[in-house]
Amino acid sequence: MADPAEHRAAAEEEEATAAGEEEDTGAQIAPIVKLEEVAITTGEEDEEILLDMKAKLYRFDKDGSQWKERGTGAVKLLKHKETAKVRLVMRQAKTLKICANHLVVASIKMQEHAGSDKSCVWHALDFADGELKEEMFAIRFGSVENCKKFKDLVDQIAEEQGKNEEKESEEASSAAELVEKLTVTEEKKEEPVEKKETPAAVDDTKDAKE
């Protein structure tokens, strides 16, 4: 008569072997949902990155008369390849939500933040919330060197934009003067010529009165 313990061990070994065969079938199961790659556009495809740094941005709340944190992430200075316009863009690190988005124009003046050599302050017409609003920003970097690099580059770009605006204004003024001269010349050429009565017409009138 077989030992019950041996019989039990043999049965367990058979079950283990069967289970192993079921698990290692080599079959490949296709996923129920097929995910396709989606191209993400950021609006920065036609721009050259002049600067890309990590920083923390603050916005001054006029109603509460206090600074409020806007977000922590990467601040970029982007130059458009065609127009050469430069804008400042900053997105929050985790959500990628835009917390600053404005052009760097000649009127922008970077100032050191009182009490911190790692921060600077400026005013700008910002479009981060979908409408142009006058904002006062403060930005803080991890080092004095990064803050200085950011400030110096923005000041340099603002100065260059100012020179470009002056040049464009002079060109527009010259073009307007040229158009005005051409208009005056054309008007002189198109002045109507007064018609003179012929002697025959005068004689006909006299005959009619007689």
Image (tube, rainbow, N blue to C red):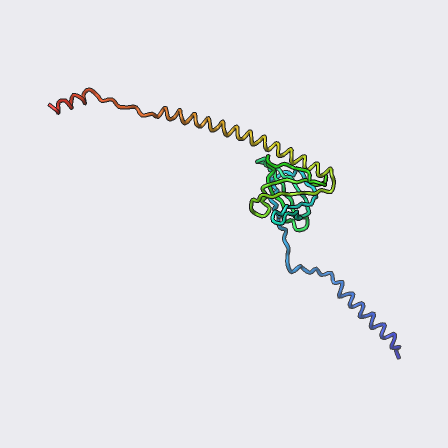
Q: How many marks?
A: 0
| Quadrant of the drawing holding the C terminus | top left
Q: Nearer the viewer, residue 84 or 20?
A: 84
Residue 114: image quadrant is: top right
Image location of residue 23, percent across then percent down:
76, 64
Q: Residue 202: percent from the left, percent from the top?
A: 18, 22
At horizontal 67% and vertical 37% (from top left) the residue drawn is 151
Residue at x 37% of width, y 24% of height: 188
Q: Is residue 56 left or right of residue 207?
A: right
**Quarter-of-image position of residue 138:** top right
Height in image: 1 above or below 189? below
Q: Is residue 67 above or below residue 194?
A: below
Q: Position of residue 204 (x, y in %)?
A: 15, 23
Residue at screen point 16% across, 21% down: 203
Residue under the point 73% across and 38% down: 144
Residue with the most extreme left position = 210
Nearest the viewer among 150 and 115 is 115
Q: Quick check: 11 above or below 30?
A: below
Percent across and percent down for residue 83 are 57, 36
Which residue is at the front of the view, 152 or 197? Answer: 152
Question: Would residue 192 be found to the left or right of residue 174 on screen?
Answer: left
